[in-house]
Amino acid sequence: ETGADIAMPLDVTERGGAERLVEAAMSRGGDLVLVNNAAYNIPKSLLDTSDDDWDTTLACCLDHVFRMSRAAVRAMVEKGGGSIVNLASVNQIHANPNMAAYTAAKAGVRGLTMQVAVQYGPQGVRCNAISPGLVVTEATAPSFSDYDRRLNIEAYPVGRVGEPADVAWAALWLASDEACFVNGIDLPVEHRVLGLVDHTHCAPAEFAQDLVAAQFCLVFRCHISQRSFPGANFARILR
C-alpha cells in the first residue's frame, strides 16, 4: 500500500475474487468506477484452437467481465450509480486472422456492455466499452515481429500504432461525469482503415499465454492511473 493506492493481486478467473475487490474498493469511500481490462490471447485459427485454448481465453476475457460487473453493479445500485468501462477490441468489429477465441470473447464483452447499460441505466449505472486497435506496450511489444509492426503502421493513416495513453484518456472520459449522458456505446480507439492484419508473423503463442493485462477496480476521484504488469491482476484504488 502506498498512500491512498492499494494493489491487490488476483486471479480474475477465481470465483469470489470479484466480490473481494469490490468490497475493498467500497471500503475506501468515493464513487465506484470499474475498468475491466484483464486479457489473454493465443493467436490461433479456429481449426488450431483447442478446447483448453477456448475455455482459458473466454475465462480471462469474458467470464471475468461478467463476474466483476455483477459484483460492481450490486454495489453501484445500492449507492445510486456508478460507471463501468470494459475493454473490448477492434477485432470484434473487423476480424483478423488467427484470433478465433479472442475475437469471440471480445464480441461477448461488447454485447454484455450494452445489456448492462440497458438493464441498469435507470438505476444510475453507466456501462461503456472501448475497442482499441493495436496498442504496443512493454509487455506486448515482443509479440510483434518487425514485419507485423510495419504492416500495422502502414495501415494507420496517422503513421503510428496506439499507445497506452490513447486508451487511458478514453477510459478516463467514459468514467467521468463528462460522459454522464453516454451509456451503452462501444468506442473504437484506433486510426486504422484497413480491415485485415495478418497475425501469422506474431511471436509464438507461448508468449501470449504469459500476457495478462491489469484488472482495475477504482474508487474514482479525479484521475485514473493505468499501469500494466505481466501476469498481474489487481485492484487499484485512488482517492
Image (tube, helix red, strand yellow):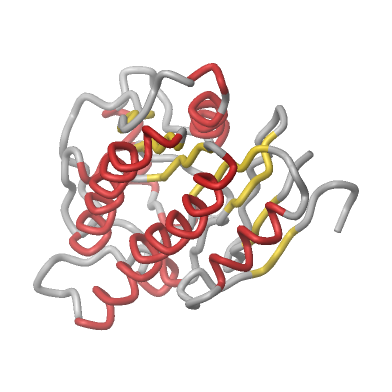
Report x, y in % for residue 154: 30, 28
x 70%, y 30%: residue: 223
Of 85 and 126, nearer the camera is 126
Q: Quadrant of the N terminus?
A: bottom right
Residue 89 falls in image quadrant: top left
Residue 110 falls in image quadrant: top left
Q: Is residue 131 left or right of residue 97?
A: right
Report x, y in % for residue 37: 48, 51
Q: How many marks?
A: 0
Q: Is residue 127 left or right of residue 51?
A: right
x 20%, y 82%: residue: 51
Q: Is residue 167 left or right of residue 60?
A: right
Q: Quadrant of the C terminus?
A: top right
Whether residue 117 is situated above or below residue 40 in the rendered picture: above
Report x, y in % for residue 17: 56, 72
Report x, y in % for residue 83: 50, 37
x 69%, y 53%: residue: 25
Whether residue 191 is situated above or below residue 132 in the rendered picture: above
